[in-house]
Amino acid sequence: MILRLALLTSALAIAVACDPTTPTGPVDPDTEADTDADTTPPDSSAIPCPEIWDTELPPLQIDAWTYNGESVLLASPDCCDQYRELRIADTCEYICAPDGGFTGQGDMRCTDFFDTATHVETVWVNRNP
């Protein structure tokens, strides 16, 4: 019983110490807030396939890949349990979701994507997620 209590207390102490919202030192009330934060909205005119990806809540990032000899775009969603959509670069036509979703395995239509595709470049990043 004492061992369980000690383990529980240790786990709680570690969790509190590792919490990024827990202050780690004295707080200076005269310190200004971070004024370098990028508050400009994402450049929706530069986003590939704007008719597909909602420019109100755009993906966090869009990368160009080569998959099965074709140029494709992979969009990383802005939050959890969502598919990462793979689309044909020229037409924006949906191909599959190689990962993401509740299981993390995508829609199972292109399970070989990460084994066979080649990353080309990051083409768009949401600087204000």
Image (tube, rainbow, N blue to C red):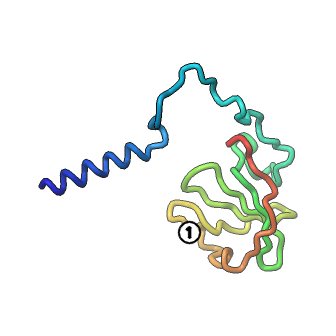
Would you identify the image quadrant in which residue 86 lies?
bottom right
Amino acid type, residue under disc 1 in the picture: Gln
Instruction: Name the quadrant of the C terminus.
Output: top right
Residue identified by numbered label 1: 105
Q: Give left or right: position of 88 versus 96.
A: right
Q: Is residue 93 visible?
A: no
Q: Give left or right: position of 105 versus 14.
A: right
Q: Residue furthest top?
A: 30
- Residue 29 drawn at (x, y percent): 54, 20
The residue shown at (72%, 33%) is 36
Question: Judging from the image, what secondary structure is the residue with disc 1 in?
Answer: loop
* Residue 35 higher or lower than 84, as above or below: above
Would you identify the image quadrant in which residue 75 lies?
bottom right
* Residue 122 higher or lower than 33, as above or below: below
Q: How many numbered marks have been drawn onto this rendered protein structure?
A: 1
* Residue 51 higher or lower than 116, as above or below: above
The residue shown at (83%, 74%) is 70
Q: Is residue 114 visible?
A: yes
- Give whichever of 33, 95 is nearer the camera: 33
Would you identify the image quadrant in which residue 101 lies?
bottom right
Instruction: Name the quadrant of the N terminus.
Output: bottom left
The residue shown at (72%, 54%) is 61
The residue shown at (24%, 55%) is 7
